Image (spheres, helix red, strand yellow):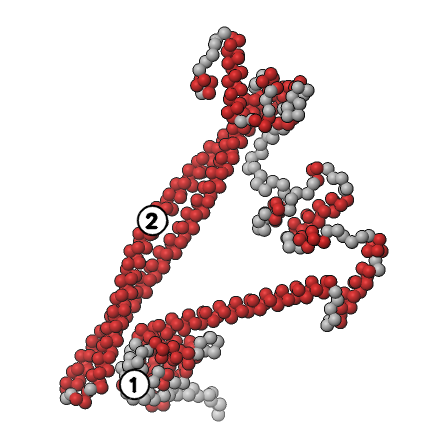
Amino acid sequence: MAAQGPRVPPRPSTSERTPIPEPYNRNSRSVCKQLRQIHKACGQWPWDLLPGSVPDELDEEMLKQLGAAVKFASDDQHDVTVFEVAEWLKGQIKDGELLTSKHCFDVMDWVMYIHDERTDYKENYTNNSKATQVDRVKHDERQSGRKPATSDEHGSGRRSSRIRKRQHSNDEVTRPPSPRPATQSRQKKRSPRTRSSTAKTAAEAEAQPEPEPKYEPKPKAKPEAEPESEPESASEPDSEPEPEPEPQHNHDMEMDVDSDPNDNAGTNITTHRSLIGTSYKTLDEAIAASSHRLEVAHLNLKEYEEGLEIEKEALDAINASLSDASQAHEAAIQNWRNAVLKADTKQNELKQIQDFAHSFSPDTQAAFTQEIRRLHDQALEEEKQASNELRTRRRDFCILEEKKDAKEGNIKKLSARIRRYQDDIDAEEVKHQRLIAEHYLEVLSNDIIQGFDIADISYARILEIKLERDQRIWKWTGQGDAPLEDWLG
């Protein structure tokens, strides 16, 4: 005879389920199902948790919210207990009042808020404990670097051997201690790349007692001011290289008239003459490249400004929509409060009819009860619709708030980019004017260059010198003086 498999236990009948006490067993089947789920989660009925505050006629939506809060609090993984939920509800329900849908919705929000708050506290406490432990370990390591510890035999043995090795080393006996402990302690806070480059520079400085000016170390404030995200740029002398290489003119070699113009006049004139034929074409190319960069920069700046105007117009439209959404949200809140108040009123009226039912005839009692229940169900339906409308309005309002924050962030980024771009354009214009000044300076006569200081190079000054030169040429040719506007134009 073949062995039969295990039989599936039959589903318990309705009579075997947990019985619901009267008068709560008179509610609908869905309400009774919610009551059994609450009892299964925490082992108590709602009227046991809130004695004298639970109405006889219960609503399914109200019990869903209360059941969700009780199930959440019954889980040991969460930081809220059923006792705390009951105590909070007792504090919210005033004397003589009954449990309402508003209390059940609010208790779910309160449970989630308390859970999130306590979870954040635990995470912060754990992170602080880990940070404190790491700091303690670092402190112990620093202490162990100065003197041996007595608790760890192996560690103390290794440190003692290292100390004895340093004490008996010939280098330590013959060589004085390092005179740069402060510099090394400061270098520990830097990145590994910066620390290695600084150590290499320090070694070169010690190896060369009289270094040349080009090997002098730079101030420490400059590499520290560099952002940590770009460590490679800390060792480079130019933090912002030019996009296109430009010819650099040595003005000191062309005109060095600061020291003694009378003695070096002939040398400066000869040097400048020799540079006119070799660098004139290069200078023209530099001026043309600078003009092209200025033209492109102005076009890009115009595009940025147009984009900024578009973002501002979009922000104005969002602000207008946000104002309308805020008004609709406030109206939805008021409608929801009115619906909740109406539902509570109908619930209290139904409770009073049930309390004084013995003073009416059975027909009158049934008619009153049926009418009040119908009005109560209608009020609950209105409350549900108002709650859904409130959620929709709140979601729309939050979406508009996020869009507004995004637009404001874009506007800030574009404004900062425009400011930086304008600064770059101003610097390029100054460079362009200097190139034009150098161009005019190369075509001037040598007798004018002799009394001209290189530190005074400017676009306006070069135009004045050019005007004087041209007026002198016109006088020599017999054409007389021309108006100033013609020369400047």
Position of the C terminus by quadrant: top left
Amino acid on which the number 1 mark rests in the picture:
Tyr
Residue found 70% across the figure and 40% down from its top: 215
- The spot of residue 157 in percent (x, y) is 78, 68
- The spot of residue 89 in percent (x, y) is 36, 78
To which residue does mark 1 refer? 24
The residue furthest bottom is: 1
Amino acid on which the number 2 mark rests in the picture:
Asp
Q: Is residue 274 visible?
A: no
To which residue does mark 2 refer? 316
Q: Nearer the viewer, residue 369 or 225?
A: 225
The residue furthest top is: 478
Residue found 49% across the figure and 35% down from its top: 426
Q: Is residue 249 above or below residue 195?
A: above
Q: Is residue 484 visible?
A: yes
Badge 2 marks a residue whose secondary structure is helix
Q: Nearer the viewer, residue 292 or 211?
A: 211
Estimate the spatial distance between the alpha carbons at disc 1 and disc 2, rounded to whole Å.
56 Å
User: Left or right: 100 with respect to 243?
Assistant: left
User: Left or right: 458 with respect to 354?
Assistant: right
Badge 1 marks a residue whose secondary structure is helix
